[in-house]
Amino acid sequence: MSLIGQHLDESVVWRIDTRSFELADHVEWDAHSHDDQHELLWGTRGALTAETDDGYFAIPGSLGLWIPAGVTHRVVAAAGTAFRCTFIDVDIPPIATRTTAVAIPEVVRAVLDRLGASPHLSASPRIHAEELALSLLEPVEVSTIDLPLPRDTRTRLVAGALLADPSDDRSLEDWGHHVGASARNLSRLFVSETGMSFSTWRTRARMRRAIEWLAADYTVAHVSRRAGYATPSAFVQAFRRELGRTPGEFATVRSDATKKSA
C-alpha cells in the first residue's frame, strides 16, 4: 500500500500532496514516471507542455493535466511559468486511465492549496476535502498531435532543428548537405523511422509548436509567422487539416473550459 505521507498525528494520512513551482527560467524534466502516485499538473501562470504515449499536450493556466500512475512523461515549462504539481496516492481510483486534460474549477484550486497549507487538519475533514476536490475534476478534450521522433543521428538533427525553429523551410537537399546524407536517404529514413514523409513530419512539427504557442495566448498571426506560414489563412487551413478544428475553435475550447472553472 502506497501512502504519500503521515504528518504530525500519525493517524492522519495525506493521500494528496501539492507542491508549487515558480520558474524564472526555462526548465525541462526528462522522461520519468511515478509508479505509486497519480499526478495532476495545473498552472497558475503561463503554459506547460507534456509528452506521454497518449500524445503531446500543451496545457494553459486554465486547465490541468491528469497523468495516471506508471505513465512515462516528459514536461517542459517556459520561463516565467508558475504551476502546481499535485500527487495523488495510487490507491485512490483515477479519474481517467489515460493522460487527459481536465478542467479545474476555482473551488478545486482553493481546496488543493488549502490542503497543502493545513498540516494540522484532522483526518475526517481532510478525507472529505480530498474526495470533494477529485470529484469536481472534469476531463476535457484538447488538441493533441502524434509526432514520433526519428532515431538515426542525421534525421534526429533535422527533427531537433525543426522543432526549435519550425519556420525553417530548407529542402531535404539542403538538410542533406547540412547533416551529411543524400536527400533520398533522408527521405527513406523519415518514412521508415516515423511512418510519415519528411513533408508530413515537418507539418506536424509545426502544428505541435503551434498548439504550444496558442495555449500560451499568442495571436494566430504571430503563431502563423513563427510556425513558418506565409499568411494566417494558410496556417489556419493547415491547422484544420491536421487537427480537425481551426486555431480559433481551439481557443474556444480552452475558453469554455475556463468558464467551467470559474
Image (cartoon, rainbow, N blue to C red):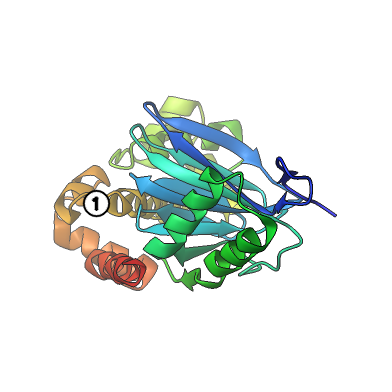
Q: Nearer the viewer, residue 141 or 53?
A: 141
Q: Nearer the viewer, residue 159 or 59?
A: 59
- Do we see residue 76 in this rendering? yes
From the image, tell me which residue sits under label 1: 217
Report whether 4 appears left or right of 241.
right
Residue 217 lies, with reference to residue 226, above or below; the image says: below
Residue 68 lies, with reference to residue 160, above or below; the image says: below
Q: Nearer the viewer, residue 95 or 132?
A: 132
Report whether 65 appears left or right of 225.
right
The percent coordinates of residue 123 (x first, y second) are 69, 57
The percent coordinates of residue 262 (x first, y second) are 31, 67
Q: Amino acid at mark 1?
A: Asp
- Residue farthest toward the right in the current orientation of the protein: 1
Mark 1 crowd level (few <14, some 14–19, many ≥20, 10 Å Cα) = some
The residue located at (24%, 43%) in the rendering is 226
- The image quarter containing residue 167 is top left
Q: Nearer the viewer, residue 203 or 88?
A: 88
Mark 1 element type = loop
